[in-house]
Image (cartoon, grey):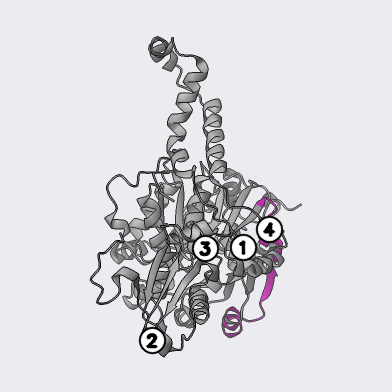
């Protein structure tokens, strides 16, 4: 088996790798490093996130750089600020014994002046996001005249983010470039187009499929109605005390909205997406790494810069549009030989996508039931018991406080004391979940539920004149537009220019939010509570989340797993 010490790297690099505790190269490193040391031709490396790509190109790059030349010889392009910063940190570690080596990271979201001053110190290696690098070139803050090596890291993501023209511009403006090393998770037509245009006689190294499957990851999926997706997320968080994970969303807006809703209910989470400025994103990552946050809600692009080995859970709030992105997400857990769990919240229509991803990662996914209230209470009980069992009080704790505790509780039986302590920890959880509903898809609503006062009657500005000539047709339209189970919609009345229908209370807000963003034959759809329809002089009997009385919500999920929300179901 190849070891780092057997590679023909500079002694300073071998020493740095040994200091970092690395002994055996990963598969992508074993394939790429020996080739780039002996014959640094153009290459394409295909590997997933978390497979050691940075060292695969970073160690050969630093090996070939001439430290005595005070000019930019190597350029690494990355799609995000976080990944750019991460690569720079890794390069500093690898080059800790290379005296005279200077590397600089330049990226947007921070004042450009400080980066211009750093470039005046003549770094040999620059790590950059495309937009900021072009800005610096236009200001003549650096020259690419002597760049011999260019690395395109996460090339597929850069192209997905719209950097195609920037990459073309930068590659055209490196006249003395001798070698181009392209690394990507996927080899689509766009990536191959860059290779054909700017690379010659390249060699391709792929470990994508080998690393797409991590046997230490338990892949789970939970099937629910689309409008219950957020409540399912809450249920899973409450069922997983001590979670340290990432919740993935498709869009920046979803990321922000979901994080805000969780924070309002007391969860220790924060969003992480591209619309946040660099200072805020760095602060979020600092809080996450020191475990002040139990989870972050992130988009796929923002998560590219996250390099944390102890993540216990990845939660897909929604599955990604591209099944291969799933492997990027799930690869955030079970790193460094540890185990992890990847949970996906899906609707019945998305089960076929789960099957597609199963074939991609070559692993069976476990269909799990969304836990009921009793299971949540039981799980948190055992969590607190484990905490007590493993607790290690300070040495002087007993000496200072034990006599006082004995005096206070000497007349109380041990079982009674334990019962009261557990009740303090669990009473709010029990209050929430003693009558919690079943969130699993396929749960049949009883006739009693259909008549429940929590059902909401809605008004919609579509009727027979719009082609909705039967209740069945209206139900079908609503179900297709919202991806909801048609059985959730009942007591339908269709009139000439409007319609009315009943839905279960927890689906009403979802229908309002979803349909109000859509148009029908060019006309904006309007959804209101039936007692708020136009020209209705009746009383407004509905309340928004912001109108709730003080005290209706209390924090439910804090650092260390405390759980104290008062939420009605």
Q: CA distance from mark 4 to mark 3?
A: 50 Å
Q: CA distance from mark 2 to mark 3?
A: 79 Å
Q: Nearer the viewer, mark 2 or mark 3?
A: 2
Report the span colored magenta: 191-217
Observer-nearest of 246 and 278: 246
Q: Nearer the viewer, mark 4 or mark 2?
A: 2
Q: Is residue 149 visible?
A: no
Query: Are the residues at dot 4 and dot 1 in contact (C-beta closer than 8 Å)?
Result: no
Q: Nearer the viewer, mark 2 or mark 1?
A: 2
Q: CA distance from mark 3 to mark 1?
A: 37 Å
Image side of residue 150 versus residue 188, left or right: left
- Secondary structure of the residue carrying tag 2 is loop
Of the numbered discs 2 and 3, the one sitting upstream in the chain is 3
- Secondary structure of the residue carrying tag 4 is loop
Residue with the mark numbered 2: 496
Residue with the mark numbered 3: 66
Q: Quadrant of residue 63?
A: bottom right
Residue with the mark numbered 4: 365
- Residue 505 at x, y = what percent? 42, 61
Of the numbered discs 3 and 1, the one sitting upstream in the chain is 3
């Amino acid at each position: 088996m190849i070891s780092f010490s057997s590679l023909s790297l500079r002694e300073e690099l071998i020493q740095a790798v040994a200091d970092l505790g690395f002994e055996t190269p990963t598969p992508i490193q074993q394939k790429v490093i020996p080739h780039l040391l002996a014959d640094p031709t153009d290459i394409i490396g295909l590997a997933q996130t978390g497979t050691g790509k940075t060292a695969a190109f970073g160690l050969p790059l630093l090996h070939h750089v001439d430290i005595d030349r005070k000019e930019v010889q190597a350029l690494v392009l990355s799609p995000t600020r976080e990944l750019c910063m991460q690569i720079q940190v890794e390069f500093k570690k690898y080059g800790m014994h290379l005296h005279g080596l200077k590397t600089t990271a330049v990226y947007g979201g921070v004042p450009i002046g400080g980066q211009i001053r750093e470039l005046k110190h003549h770094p040999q290696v620059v790590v950059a996001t495309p937009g900021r690098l072009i800005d610096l070139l236009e200001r003549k803050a650096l020259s690419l005249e002597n760049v011999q090596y260019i690395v395109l890291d996460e090339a597929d993501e850069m192209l997905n983010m719209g950097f195609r023209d920037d990459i073309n511009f930068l590659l055209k403006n490196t006249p003395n470039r001798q070698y181009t090393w392209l690394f990507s998770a996927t080899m689509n037509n766009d990536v191959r187009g860059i290779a054909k245009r700017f690379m010659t006689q390249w060699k391709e190294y792929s470990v994508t499929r080998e690393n797409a499957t991590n046997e230490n990851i338990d892949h789970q999926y939970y099937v629910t109605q689309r409008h219950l997706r957020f409540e399912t997320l809450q249920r899973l968080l409450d069922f997983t005390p001590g979670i340290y994970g990432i919740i993935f969303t498709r869009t920046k807006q979803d990321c922000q909205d979901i994080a805000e809703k969780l924070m309002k209910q007391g969860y220790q989470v924060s969003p992480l997406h591209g619309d946040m400025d660099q200072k805020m994103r760095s602060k979020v990552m600092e809080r996450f790494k020191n475990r002040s946050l139990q989870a972050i809600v992130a988009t796929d692009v923002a998560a590219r810069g996250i390099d944390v080995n102890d993540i216990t859970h990845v939660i897909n709030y929604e599955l990604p549009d591209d099944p291969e992105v799933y492997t990027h997400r799930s690869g955030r857990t079970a790193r460094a030989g540890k185990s992890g769990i990847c949970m996906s919240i899906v609707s019945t229509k998305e089960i076929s996508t789960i099957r597609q991803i199963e074939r991609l990662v070559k692993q069976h996914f476990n269909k799990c039931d969304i836990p009921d209230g009793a299971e949540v209470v039981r799980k948190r009980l055992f969590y607190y018991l484990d905490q007590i069992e493993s607790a290690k009080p300070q040495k002087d704790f007993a000496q200072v406080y034990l006599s006082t505790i004995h005096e206070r509780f000497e007349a109380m039986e041990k079982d009674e004391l334990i019962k009261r302590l557990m009740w303090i920890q669990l009473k709010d959880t029990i209050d929430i979940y003693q009558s919690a509903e079943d969130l699993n898809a396929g749960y049949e609503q009883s006739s009693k539920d259909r008549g429940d006062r929590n059902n909401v009657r809605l008004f919609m500005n579509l009727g027979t004149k719009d082609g909705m000539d039967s209740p069945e047709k209206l139900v079908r339209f609503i179900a297709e537009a919202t991806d909801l189970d048609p059985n959730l919609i009942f007591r339908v009345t269709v009139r000439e220019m409007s319609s009315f229908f009943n839905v279960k209370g927890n689906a009403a807000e979802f229908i309002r939010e979803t349909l109000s963003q859509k148009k029908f034959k060019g006309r904006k759809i309007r959804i209101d509570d039936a007692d708020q329809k136009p020209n209705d002089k009746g009383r407004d009997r509905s309340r928004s989340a912001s109108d709730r009385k003080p005290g209706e919500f209390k924090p439910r999920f804090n650092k260390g797993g405390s759980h104290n929300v008062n939420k009605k179901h």
